[in-house]
Amino acid sequence: MPNAYISGTGFYVPPRVVTNDDLRTQYGIDTTHEWIVQRTGIEERRFADEGVGPADLGALAAEKAIANAGIDKTDLDMIIFATLSPEHCFPGSGVYMQRKLGLCEGTNAKFVPALDVRNQCSGFLYALATASSMVKAGALKHVLVVGAEVHSAALDLSTRGRNIASLFGDGAGAVVVSATEEDRGVRHWKLGADGRFADVLAQRVWDTRKRPFIPVDAAGIGHVEPEMMWAQMEGKLVFKNAVERMMTVLMEACIANNITGADIDLFCFHQANLRINQYIQNALGIPDEKIVHNIQRYGNTTAATIPILLAEAVESGKLKRGMKVACCAFGSGFTWGAAVIDW
Ligand code: ACO
């Protein structure tokens, strides 16, 4: 049975920087840099321009991951695309990105399957678990796993929406998961979900239990109330559950690998709130040099946070061959996950 390792990483964030002060001055949100930094650690985020979707950002990240893996696009056997901000209701972003990568063109066209994963902040780890399991089963050799978000299109960028609008940013990260006979790769993953909290953090733009699924006026035009249009979140409940679930799933992943936290060389946590991660870091006694953050610069890029962290860590030389990496995430659903990887 082959092992499944991460053969290439890449990331892309849009160039437009939006600082906390910009939220106040450009969007008129009643907030302050101090409030946001103190509660979340976020100093700035990136917003994509109109016309740019997650498949665009994902394709740019994917190109880098494929190049770094030393393979050709046509070597890919599958695409897994994790996002909570897809271009459309359907189809998923994976097929749009496949088209943008040019995989369906020319004599070498390869119509690989494209799977969309809808597990919000845990989406990348759900996708990584799926990809590595398929590779380890010997079914596939190279799987492109992308996490990409364009949150800025769906944030209530007004004072009404400030508790959520100040948290999120746009970006994409990608990895190629490849088969190898070497003794390395994704050692273990652990995923979980608790649907009792499904409504605690949700964006219910439409409801297919209703007829029609969006209220329609006499002219046949749909109207969406603000509480349906924009994401809703009980922030304190999310915070508390995130801390508990992330610590637990991380320890479960270590136990399953017969290791302790001290054996981990680098921790890459989902970037929802720097305070959540610092709480876990302190509780588990993780030294500063063993953990990476980027929420200060990008905000919460949801499914993209972990692959961006991995790509940045590789690029900066902080993550090297032979190191043991632990990734961990928590998000809407609630859903959560952890993975231990021998790099
Ligand atoms: N600027 C200024 N004031 C604000 C802002 C802001 N950006 N946002 C909220 N406030 C105000 C509120 O209106 C409220 O005012 P009030 O007391 O007059 O009503 C006050 O600040 C306190 O609001 P809370 O929401 O109670 O603030 P809290 O201390 O809980 O911090 C926060 C909010 C930062 C969102 C925190 O709850 C948190 O980080 N929770 C976790 C969120 C998270 O992890 N989400 C990730 C999952 S995302 C995913 O899965 C898609």
Image: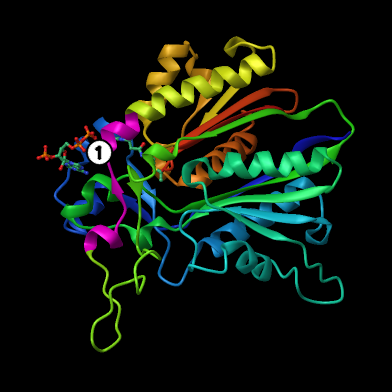
In the depicted structure, whether residue 234 falls above or below residue 254? below
Q: Taking the image as drawn, is residue 126 in sight?
A: yes
Question: Which image quadrant is residue 183 in?
Answer: top right
Question: Which image quadrant is residue 170 in?
Answer: bottom left
In the depicted structure, whether residue 33 falls above or below residue 153? above
Task: Give the extent of the magenta segment.
Answer: 226-239
Q: Residue at x 61, y 21 (%)?
A: 253
Q: Amino acid at mark 1?
A: Ile
Q: Residue at x 14, y 49 (%)?
A: 30
In the depicted structure, whether residue 67 falls above or below residue 258? below
For disc 1, the marked residue is 36
Q: Quadrant of the N terminus?
A: top right
Q: Taking the image as drawn, is residue 265 in sight?
A: no
Residues 244 and 307: in front is 244
Q: Residue at x 67, y 38 (%)?
A: 129
Residues 195 and 272: in front is 195
Q: Residue at x 29, y 58 (%)?
A: 230
x and y percentages locating residue 215 in the rendered image: 28, 73
Ligand 1: quadrant of the figure: top left
* In-image side of 200 versus 120 (left or right): left
